[in-house]
Image (cartoon, rainbow, N blue to C red):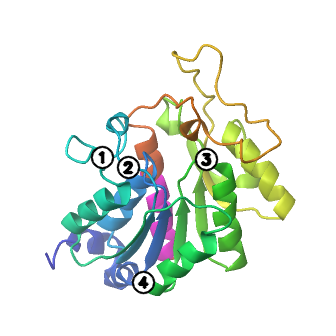
Amino acid sequence: MENWLNRTEMLIGKENVTKLKNSHVVVFGLGGVGSYVVEGIVRSGIGRISIVDKDVVDVTNINRQIIADTETIGMSKVDAEENRIQKINPHAQICKVHDFVAQQNIDNIMERILTQNGSINYVVDAIDTVSSKIEIIKYCNKNNIKIISCMGTGNKLDASKFEITNISKTSVCPLAKVMRKELKKLGIDIKVLYSKEEPIKPVQFDNGSVDYEENNIDKEVSICSSNMPPASISFVPSVAGLLIAGEVVKDLIK
């Protein structure tokens, strides 16, 4: 096991491998995007990983979430992810939080993570609910923690349309539109991954999808967390997750 990062070291050097081993990344959301973010950072040698998710693995997750298979259905996603991390790197320090992020508990969640896994080098927001995303971003902005936030990946078919930029420079994506508006009010401009592909209308929902123009941001959730789940496929959210993992790693070794 001591040589498992040899190929990585050949690419980025021993010093950077050590830097990644000593880094702490927090991933909020272990769905189609978040589970692949974790996969990418674990296999890159990130030594301290904190994972936050309230959900359990469902049979409908199998088409796109790397932690979802016939043996993990019904498990909490943080437990399933912890098992997978340990199989890849038994020495990784893992903090798992089985909870839903909200304004009233974000400070407690982050304090628990800090207590168990130490100072945070990077946060990845891969969750669906706008109000929760805002709370994570506000916390990171207040505490000078690097963060990248994922915009909508549902109802997409072209993984080549993903782009990493600041939220102020996004277009097309309905979720990015809402986030752009809310973050502008707060004077925050963060790094995000979004798609320039126009959303594909799900076949089963002829009356359209979630209305992102509501004034109440608690209603402005992505299709994932509404009564109208988004259409999805294996190779789109996974690519988004790996692109985010790559951005995190490259930022950490700059």
Q: Residue furthest left?
A: 1
Residue under the point 65% across and 20% down: 208
Q: Residues within 10 Å of mark 3 (few under 14, many from 20)?
A: many
Find residue 224 and report its horizontal and vertical position in percent.
Answer: 54, 38
Residue annotated with mark 4: 116
Q: Is residue 40 above or below residue 46?
A: above
Picture quadrant of residue 166: bottom right
Q: Is residue 14 above or below residue 185?
A: below
Tags 3 and 1 in contact by the CB under 8 Å rule?
no
Q: Secondary structure at mark 2?
A: loop
Q: Residues within 10 Å of mark 4 (few under 14, many from 20)?
A: some
Q: Earlier in the sequence, mark 1 or mark 4?
A: 1
Find residue 247 and report its horizontal and vertical position in percent.
Answer: 50, 62
Q: Earlier in the sequence, mark 3 or mark 4?
A: 4
Residue annotated with mark 2: 56
Q: Which mark is residue 134?
A: none
Q: Amino acid at mark 3?
A: Met
Give the magenta part as a residue range. Answer: 242-253
Q: How much space separates mark 1 and mark 2, taking CA atoms?
A: 6 Å
Residue under the point 64% across and 26% down: 209
Which tag is nearer the camera, tag 3 or tag 4?
Answer: 4
Residue under the point 53% across and 63% down: 124
Q: How much space separates mark 3 and mark 1, taking CA atoms?
A: 27 Å
Q: Secondary structure at mark 1?
A: loop
Residue annotated with mark 3: 151
**Residue 143 falls inside the magenta stretch:** no
